[in-house]
Image: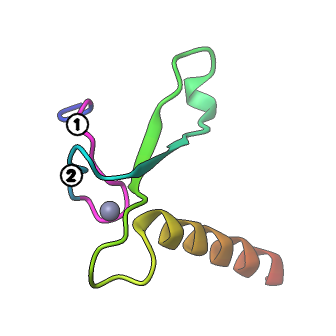
Amino acid sequence: MIGCFANQCEYCRSSIVPGQRWVREKIYDAALNGRDPSYHRYHAELFATQRESCWEKHQLEREMARTTACAA
Ligand SMILES: [Zn+2]
């Protein structure tokens, strides 16, 4: 995979530059069983125009997806 070692935000797809805060999330994938886990990275930094960081938005989206699934 190209750029697999680059620090790229999974949410906004832009790179995470040194000095910015970021969060990593372990990817749970049955296909990775017994292999090294991989991680998604997200900005934990608030940009000037944002009210939530990429990480917080990602959490919200995941929460909404779960709520929708339960309501069905
Ligand atoms: Zn981001």
The secondary structure making up most of the magenta span is: loop
User: Can residue 60 be found in the magenta stretch?
Assistant: no
Q: Residue placed at 59% from the left, 74% from the top?
A: 60
Is 32 drawn above or below residue 61 in the view shown? above
* Quadrant of the image occupied by residue 54: bottom left
Say few, some or many: other residues with alpha carbon within 10 Å of mark 1 (under 14 / 14 to 19 / 20 or more).
few
User: Residue 53, image x and y in percent?
Assistant: 42, 70
Q: Position of residue 69 (x, y in %)?
A: 74, 75
* Ligand 1 picture quarter: bottom left
Q: Is residue 30 left or right of residue 24?
A: right
Query: Looking at this view, is 20 or 40 the one in front?
Result: 20
Camera-nearest residue between 22 and 41: 22
- The amino acid type found where label 1 is placed reads Ala
Quadrant location of the N terminus in the rendered image: top left
Furthest toward the front, the residue is 19
* Magenta range: 5-13
With respect to residue 17, does 1 lie above or below? above
Please determine whether, in this image, residue 17 is positioned above or below residue 31.
Answer: below
Amino acid of disc 2: Ser
- Helix, strand or loop status at disc 2: loop
Q: Residue at x 40, y 54 (%)?
A: 42
Q: Are marks 1 and 2 in contact (CB under 8 Å)?
A: yes
Which residue lies under the disc numbered 2?
15
| Residue 67, image x, y percentages | 75, 78
Check residue 6 in the rendering and tell me which mark sits there, or answer none: 1
Count neighbours of disc 2 (C-alpha within 10 A) and say few if under 14, some if 14 to 19, many if 20 or more: some
